Every structure is written in structure tokens, then in C-alpha cells.
């Protein structure tokens, strides 16, 4: 049996966990780069390349602890 892991499966899982999934475009252009989740604690953009999950950007929104801004 081969397990299928794709953006549809991942997005469905995240939506079941209560996250709202949005399309993410490169710097406001029409170039689609993946998907975005935004919460009061963080903003995360990601995409899948075959079986690999790629984090495109991660930004902490919490004022406590470490502040992080990450771009791949």
C-alpha cells in the first residue's frame, strides 16, 4: 500500500484542526508559491514538492519570547 501525501490531504488535515488556508503568491504577484496559515501567534507559508514539505516563510506574532522571521 502506498500512502498519498499531497497538498489536498495536508490542507484538509489543517482545516480539520481549525486553520483557515489561503493561497500564497510571491510578493503580491500572480506567481503561486503555496499556502498560508495565519493565527494570532504566527504566520506560515508552505508548499509541498512531491513528498517534501517546504516552509516558505514563518513569522512569529507573539510579543513574548523570541521573534522570528524565516524565508526559504
Image (spheres, helix red, strand yellow):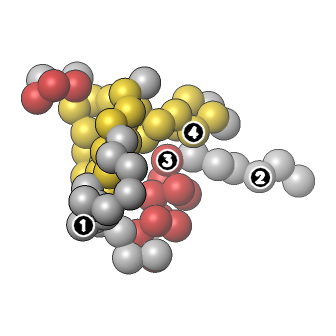
Considering the numbered disc 1 on the image, is that residue within a helix, a strand or a loop? loop
N-terminal-most mark, 3 or 1 = 3
Front tag of 4 and 1: 1
Q: Are marks 3 and 2 in contact (CB under 8 Å)?
A: no
- Which dot marks residue 18? none
* Residue 3 visible here: yes
Q: Specify which label sits upstream in the sequence, 4 or 1.
A: 1
Which residue sits at x=35%, y=69%?
Answer: 19
Q: Along the horizontal axis of the image, is 54 left or right of 25?
A: right
- Report, in whole angstroms, how far the alpha carbon at label 3 lies from the one at label 4: 9 Å
Find the distance from the CA under tag 3 to the CA under tag 1. Answer: 23 Å
Q: Which residue is mark 2?
A: 3
Q: Secondary structure at mark 3?
A: helix
How far separated are the C-alphas under marks 4 and 1? 23 Å
Residue 65, image x, y percentages: 38, 57
- Residues at discs 2 and 1 in contact (Cβ within 8 Å): no
Query: Residue 7 — which label?
Result: 3
The disc, 2 or 1, on the residue closer to the chain's N-terminal end is: 2
Q: Which residue is mark 4?
A: 53
| Residue drawn at the location 88% of the way across and 53% of the way down | 1
Residue 21 seen in the figure: no
Give the percent coordinates (x, y) of residue 43. 30, 51
- Residue at the outermost left position: 28
Q: Residue 58 lies in what quarter of the image? A: top left
With respect to residue 31, does 51 lie above or below? below
Local SS, label 2:
loop
* Residue on which the image places disc 1: 40
The residue at 46%/75% (across/down) is 17
Q: CA distance from mark 2 to mark 1?
A: 33 Å
The image quadrant that residue 26 belongs to is top left
Seen from the viewer's position, the closer of residues 45 and 35 is 45
51 or 3: nearer the viewer: 51
Amino acid at each position: 500500500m502506498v500512502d498519498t501525501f499531497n497538498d489536498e490531504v495536508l490542507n484538509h488535515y489543517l482545516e480539520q484542526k481549525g486553520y483557515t488556508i489561503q493561497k500564497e503568491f510571491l510578493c503580491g504577484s500572480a506567481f503561486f508559491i503555496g499556502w498560508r496559515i495565519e493565527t494570532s501567534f504566527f504566520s506560515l507559508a508552505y508548499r509541498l514538492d512531491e513528498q517534501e514539505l517546504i516552509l516558505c516563510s514563518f513569522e512569529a506574532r507573539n510579543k513574548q519570547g523570541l521573534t522570528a522571521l524565516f524565508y526559504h
